Amino acid sequence: MNIYVLLKQTFDTEEKIVIEDGRVSDDGVKFVINPYDEYAVEEALQQRDQHGGKVTVVSVGPDRAAEALRQALAMGADEAVLLTDGRIGADEGAAAAALEKYLSGQSVDLVLGGNFSVDSGGGQVAVRLASRLGLPHVSSITSLRIDGSTATARRDAEGDTETLEVTLPALFTAQQGLNEPRYPSLPNIMKAKKKPFQTLSLDDLGLSAAEALTERVSLSLPPERGAGQLIPGSPAEQAARLVELLRTEAKAI
Amino acid sequence: MSQPVLVIAEVRGGKLRQVSLEALQAARIARGEGADVQAVIVGSGITALAAELAGYVGGKVHAVDHPELASYNAPAYVQAVKGLLEELRPARIYLGHTAEGRDLAPQLAALLGAGQISDVISIGEGELYKRPVYAGKAFEEKRFLSGSGVVTVRPNNIPPAEPAAAPGEVVDRDYAPPADLRSIVRDVLRKAGGKVDLAEAKIVISGGRGVKSADGFKPLEELADVLGAAVGASRGACDAGYCDYALQIGQTGKVVTPEVYIACGISGAIQHLAGMSQSRVIIAINKDPEAPIFKVADYGIVGDLFDVVPLLTEEFRKVLA
């Protein structure tokens, strides 16, 4: 089975956001595999180990995204591909166009990605890609079982659980709870350095452009929330006072 | 006549979702009063809902009513609206940033070769769409560069549309199931009845490691019942196995913006704060006076949630009775 995982490098979720010159500063920031994509990598490895085949991790991003791909190789992926080019526009449509061009030249049985990225959070790239490639998809899955060319997935839909059956090749996006991503072992970290790693530009893909259809006009931080008041007293007094404040001062309940 | 704008309304539990009226309002704000705003509603047995929707829209409401559309299925729903999109060539499409909208929107954007701006919370002058990035640690304003655009609207942020001066006309549309449905919904397990949805809840009661066990959520659930609130959790509580990941609030998990957020036994890690700090009123209950959650709370109670929460439930019962 040829398995492809879409992977984005994002800020660690414990990072604070600092804006400098209208952009998010990445000074000293710790980068990780987007947590939802990490579930996708783990799922790909488990499916490969069960059914045989090869796992290729693919990312669209700047040069530093290579680190995240190496991390996925260290987890156990077989090959990595970084699509990097200043001409790939900065939105989900552009990323999907580059990925489509790359994947349409490959023999694909299964594509896995994250449900959304924890940075831009558009939740578009994987589903757009499925549509562009004409693949059936199920988004936000919490389990995946493959039997021959049929995949059965459970999808989380705001607390409802839908069970869907699709025919491979197909694309799935991972929701929390799908699996427990592994940590790379030291021998695997060493092995990862020797695994095939391709870096491709738009010229390599045979694309003249992958244009963004939207653009960012401004960026700002949320208004600071000042610390409020601590309510003193016994638990009973605190509870009574809080209810009173919520009704009179905050007019919330 | 300018190109029409299309709102895709959503049906859940036999009702028109409020977020669909918020999407309608988004269309009006973004495109101005003169815009030709139409809507489409997809489902099974939706005659009354289509009429209800028409009361808000004023323009045409296209109804695609078919037994196979009773619950959301990606290829079936795309098929249901595809013909309409080809006829109308809408300049914009607005829908809710819900499980259904999040899945449907990128497919329609790909189909139309359109840009998409997801999870919009407000719309400014010059059709600028404001949305959170890094789960609300920052905000960006985006615009469409050219062509058509798809917008998903975060529930609870844009006020719902008021009824139209005169109801619009409902137009029934045929549905021809796709020849090969490559994705089949085998089963839908609805979550326990009566529970309030996290994303749309006006009040959220959330538990962290301080709840100590799955049973520890019981007092929170009792308070939620009294207030008509939804129950959420921090990553700590989910990782510890006290609750399902579906409840997780944070940069991973869900982002919520309720009127009132009550954090019980949650320390306030930055990844959790990202998911709730835009709530209007934040209340923190924690034994540790140094917990970072107190830095963003409007009202803080230093104390044991197992003492305080049941007392709060009692107080609210009294005043809301």
Image (cartoon, coloured by chain):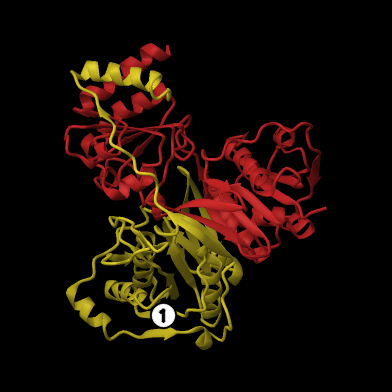
Chain colours: A yellow, B red
Mark 1 — residue? Answer: A81
The quadrant of the picture occupied by the N terminus of chain A is bottom left
Residue B209 location, quadrant: top left
The image position of residue A20, as x and y in percent, is 36, 62
Residue B71 location, quadrant: top right
Please tell me whether residue B195 is drawn above or below residue B122 in the rendered image: above
A242 left or right of B8 in image = left
The quadrant of the picture occupied by the C terminus of chain A is top left
Please tell me whether residue A193 is drawn above or below residue B93 in the rendered image: below
Q: Local crowd at mark 1 within 10 Å, few (<14), some, or many (≥20)?
A: some
Please tell me whether residue B181 is drawn above or below residue B131 in the rendered image: below
B124 left or right of A224 in image = right
At label 1, the amino acid type is Val
- Please tell me which residue is depicted at 24% across the width and 82% down the height of the picture: A191
Q: Nearer the viewer, residue B92 or A2?
A: B92
Chain bearing tag 1 is A
Q: Is residue A115 visible?
A: no
Please tell me whether residue A158 is drawn above or below residue A96 in the rendered image: above
